[in-house]
Image (cartoon, helix red, strand yellow):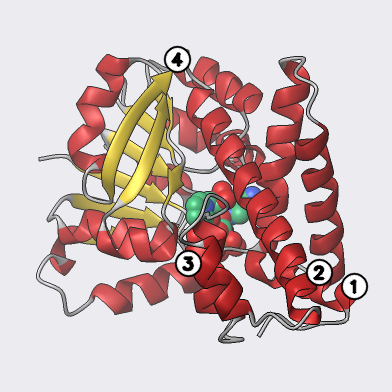
Amino acid sequence: MTRVAFLGLGDIGGRMARRVAAAGMDLTVWNRTAARAQRFMSDIASSASADRVRVASSAGEAVRGADTIISCLSTSADVESVLAGDPAVLRSLSRGAVWVDCTSGDPPTSRRLAATLAGHGVAYLDAPVSGGTTGAEQGTLTVMCGGELATLDRVRPVLATFGGKIVHCGPVGSGDAVKAVNNALLAVNLWSAAEGLAALRKAGVAPDVALDVINASSGRSNATMTLIPQRVLTRAFPRTFRLALLDKDVAIAAAFLREERVPAPITQLAAELMRMAHAALGEAADHVEAVQIVERWAGAEIA
Ligand code: NDP
């Protein structure tokens, strides 16, 4: 029986942990704010596998006896602080276990985490995910992994509970790097689509008409096909992925491109725009709400 510890029950982490629980694995969950873990437990209370799930009162308690540890926190620095903040965590790890960090993290910190854990006989994968909260609920996330292929193969059945596509990207840090580049593309596509649609609106072209054309043409993206029709045109702006996290991701991409000495004016500008939008809209805002800044500047609503 696989024994899984899941650390971090946020918007996406909680949904991923539910998939692990639903697969009938032996699961221990932990969340820094205990109320969130209690909510998780009451949400799954009526499910068939509820008796295999328990909540731990500390990260150290959660990882004890686990052969797979999954973390899904805001940043790599948060994962590092969990490891460094409580000596019981490293002490409680079983030699031979695998730590899978599903945080959208940064490559240098992932390499440090891998080295620290290797010193305790624990293998590490950076394994950020893509597909949003809906993908997590449906078990169709893309999981991009950095680390040894043999390590990935050991935890593949656990990742398959929430992942529909699991890709080995290369050595430790490469999952983080692919995720950061992906999310930089999301930011660029969302922002530039909003600029174009606002201008078209002012010129008298309705956004749904413009999107009808764009989505049958070469400028289409997930922003034009899904995010803007479902969240902007409807003015629903549901909060599923915080702008603060996208800001963090694009900053990771900008640092990664700089590190690789690739001139990257678009990515650097996107990082500045996300930082500015995050500062203007606050911690709770969803990433798609960044469109409202473009609308404000344009003096036109995309609706
Ligand atoms: P949330 O902001 O909803 O939750 C963050 C989680 O991290 C919470 O469980 C929080 O605990 C925990 N946390 C933050 N800092 C610390 C810390 N220092 N020590 C311990 N726990 C900490 O984030 P999401 O669940 O949305 O995202 C998690 C990761 O997944 C992020 O890296 C994000 O970029 C990525 N992601 C998110 C997607 C989405 O659609 N939401 C899509 C793809 C990737 P507490 O409850 O105590 O605050």
Q: Quadrant of ligand 1?
A: bottom right
- Three-letter residue code for mark 1: Trp
Q: Name the element at disc 2.
A: helix
Q: Name the element at disc 3.
A: helix
Mark 2 or mark 4: name the one nearer the start of the chain.
Answer: 4
Query: 63 or 36: which is nearer to us?
Result: 36
Mark 2 or mark 3: name the one nearer the start of the chain.
Answer: 3
Mark 1, residue position: 297
Mark 4, residue position: 118
Mark 3 and mark 1 in contact? Answer it, CB < 8 Å. no
Q: Residue 176, how many percent across, how many down?
A: 54, 32
Callout count: 4
Residue neighbourhood size for the residue with mark 4, other residues' Cα within 10 Å, grouped as few (<14), some (14–19), many (≥20): some
Indicate left or right for 184 with 224 as reference. Answer: right
Mark 2 and mark 4 in contact? Answer it, CB < 8 Å. no
- What residue is at 25 percent from the left and 15 percent from the top? 150
Mark 2 and mark 1 in contact? Answer it, CB < 8 Å. yes
Q: Is residue 270 above or below residue 213?
A: above
Mark 2, residue position: 294
